[in-house]
Amino acid sequence: MDPASGSTVGVGDRVTYTLSFHNTGRGAAQVDYTDHLADVLDDAELTGSPTASFGLLATGPIDGLLHVTGTVAPGATGTVTYVVTVRGHGRLTNLLTTIDTRPPDTCVPTDPLCTDNPVTEPPLAVTGAPALGLVSVALWAMLAGGWLLVAIRRRPGSRRD
């Protein structure tokens, strides 16, 4: 994953997920996994389609699930890669499980099948509010000065020119 799990990401950032399946055995290895993307896609948008290599096939995501199936030859590594663009705030939490395993309720930082990235809040837009406050203070000061001037001129014993 780029950036690494635990890294903070922001709106507009691109996050690349790479699922790797390395076969250390002597025979062909069957792959049948589900990538649970619902907690990614609620705050990000898939950019393009997932790509698969070395005998793997990625289908979906459908209802927040990406299915990875296929066969990996001995000593080979099959991968599935996809990119999302962050569009919201919250967290990008991704869980990979075997097809028949229910995902855990929470992401454990040491679990290599789980990634979690907090999304920073976008900065607030600057509006005219600070300038409006200064204008209001200036107008009140001018009104008070005018009132004071009128009060001084109307005071008994003041000279009128």
Image (tube, grey):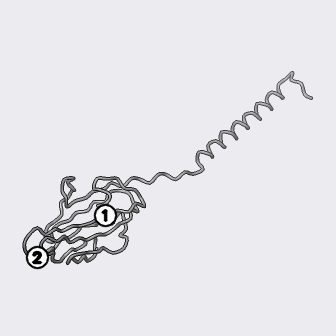
Q: Which mark is residue 28?
A: 2
| Quadrant in the picture for residue 69 | bottom left
| Quadrant in the picture for residue 80 | bottom left
| Quadrant in the picture for residue 143 | top right
Label 1 sits on residue: 40
- The residue under label 1 is which amino acid type? Val
Q: Helix, strand, or loop for circle 1?
A: helix
Circle 2 packing at 10 Å, graded few (<14), some (14-19), many (20+), is some
Q: Position of residue 137 (x, y in %)?
A: 65, 39
Q: Sequence-wise, which precedes: disc 2 or disc 1? A: 2
Q: Is residue 87 left or right of residue 94?
A: right
Q: Residue at the spot x=37%, y=70% of the render? A: 47
- The residue under label 2 is which amino acid type? Ala
Q: Helix, strand, or loop for circle 2?
A: loop
Quadrant holding the C terminus: top right
Circle 1 packing at 10 Å, graded few (<14), some (14-19), many (20+), is many
